[in-house]
C-alpha cells in the first residue's frame, strides 16, 4: 500500500521540488544521449535491452521499473509515494521529447571536447535531480530505491551503495552489447558523490528540511 505522504510538513513545497527534479532528470538523460559517450548506468542498461528487442528505451524503462518496483514494494515500502509513480512514468518520455527537440538544434557532436561539453552538465543535472526528489521524500523511483535500501540493510554509506548498483547496470549493459563509454563510467563512479553533495548543500535548503529529515526513510 502506498504510504500517505500528505501528512508531511511543507507538502506542497516537497511535491513542487520533486516535480522539478523529475523534469530536469529527463533533460539530463537527454543530454547524455546526445553526448554519445554512453548514458548513465541505469539508462545504458535500458537502452541496451531496448536495442536487443527493438523497442524505444522510454517504453522499456517503464517495464524495467516494474521489476524494480516489486523489490521496492517488498523491502522499501515506506519509500513508495507520488514521486515513485511520477519518476516511473515520466522520465523516459521527457528524455525522448528533449532529444527530439534539442538534437536538431545542438547537432551531432563530432569532437571529444564537444561530447564532454554535453556530458558534464548531464552529470550535474542528473545528480541534482536525484538529490531534489530524494530529499523531497514523497516517493523514491524504483531504481534509485535499490541503493537506498541496500545502504539501510548492510550499512555502508550511500556513496558506495550507489556505486555498486550503477556498476551492476554497467556490467549487464556491456554484456548485452550496449554502448558503454566515458559518460557511463563517470556516472558509475560519480553520481553517488555528487548526489550527496547536492543533497547536503542545495536540496535540503530548497525543500526546507533538516539534516535528519532529508532522505530519512523508515
Image: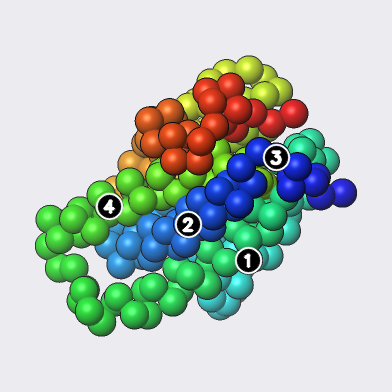
For the point 44% across and 34% down, which residue is it?
205
SS class of the residue under badge 3? loop
How far, Cα to Cα, is label 2 from label 1? 15 Å
| First along the sequence among labels 4 and 1 | 1
Quadrant for residue 39, please give it.
Answer: bottom left
Of badges 3 and 4, nearer the viewer stands 3
| Residue neighbourhood size for the residue with mark 1, other residues' Cα within 10 Å, grouped as few (<14), some (14–19), many (≥20) | some
Circles 4 and 2, Cβ within 8 Å, touching? The answer is no
| First along the sequence among labels 1 and 3 | 3
In the rendered image, which residue does mark 3 sit on?
8
Please state if 31 lies on the left or on the right of 212 as rendered.
Answer: left
Q: Position of residue 168 (x, y in %)?
A: 54, 41
In the rendered image, which residue does mark 1 sit on?
89
For the point 20% across and 53% down, which residue is it?
116
Query: Residue 164 versus residue 102: which sits nearer the camera?
Result: 102
In the rendered image, which residue does mark 2 sit on?
20
Residue 121, which numbered label?
4
Quadrant for residue 54, please give it.
Answer: bottom right
SS class of the residue under badge 2? helix
How far, Cα to Cα, is label 3 from label 4? 32 Å
Q: Is 1 above or below relative to 79?
A: below
Amino acid at each position: 500500500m502506498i504510504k500517505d505522504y500528505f501528512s508531511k510538513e511543507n507538502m506542497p513545497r516537497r511535491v513542487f521540488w520533486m516535480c522539478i527534479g523529475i523534469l530536469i532528470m529527463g533533460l539530463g538523460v537527454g543530454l547524455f544521449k546526445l553526448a554519445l559517450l554512453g548514458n548513465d548506468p541505469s539508462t545504458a542498461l535500458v537502452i541496451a535491452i531496448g536495442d536487443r528487442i527493438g523497442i524505444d528505451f522510454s517504453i522499456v524503462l517503464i517495464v524495467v521499473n516494474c521489476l524494480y518496483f516489486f523489490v521496492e514494494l517488498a523491502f522499501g515500502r515506506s519509500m513508495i509515494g507520488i514521486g515513485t509513480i511520477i519518476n516511473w512514468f515520466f522520465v523516459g518520455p521527457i528524455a525522448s521529447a528533449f532529444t527530439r527537440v534539442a538534437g536538431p538544434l545542438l547537432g551531432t557532436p563530432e569532437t571529444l571536447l564537444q561530447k564532454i561539453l554535453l556530458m558534464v552538465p548531464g552529470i550535474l543535472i542528473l545528480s541534482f535531480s536525484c538529490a531534489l526528489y530524494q530529499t523531497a521524500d514523497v516517493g523514491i523511483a524504483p531504481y534509485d530505491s535499490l541503493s537506498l535500501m541496500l545502504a539501510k540493510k548492510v550499512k555502508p554509506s550511500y556513496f558506495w551503495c550507489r556505486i555498486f548498483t550503477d556498476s551492476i547496470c554497467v556490467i549487464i549493459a556491456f554484456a548485452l552489447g550496449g554502448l558503454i563509454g566515458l559518460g557511463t563510467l563517470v556516472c558509475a563512479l560519480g553520481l553517488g558523490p555528487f548526489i550527496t553533495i547536492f543533497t547536503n548543500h542545495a536540496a535540503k535548503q530548497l525543500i526546507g528540511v533538516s539534516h535528519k529529515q532529508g532522505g530519512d526513510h523508515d
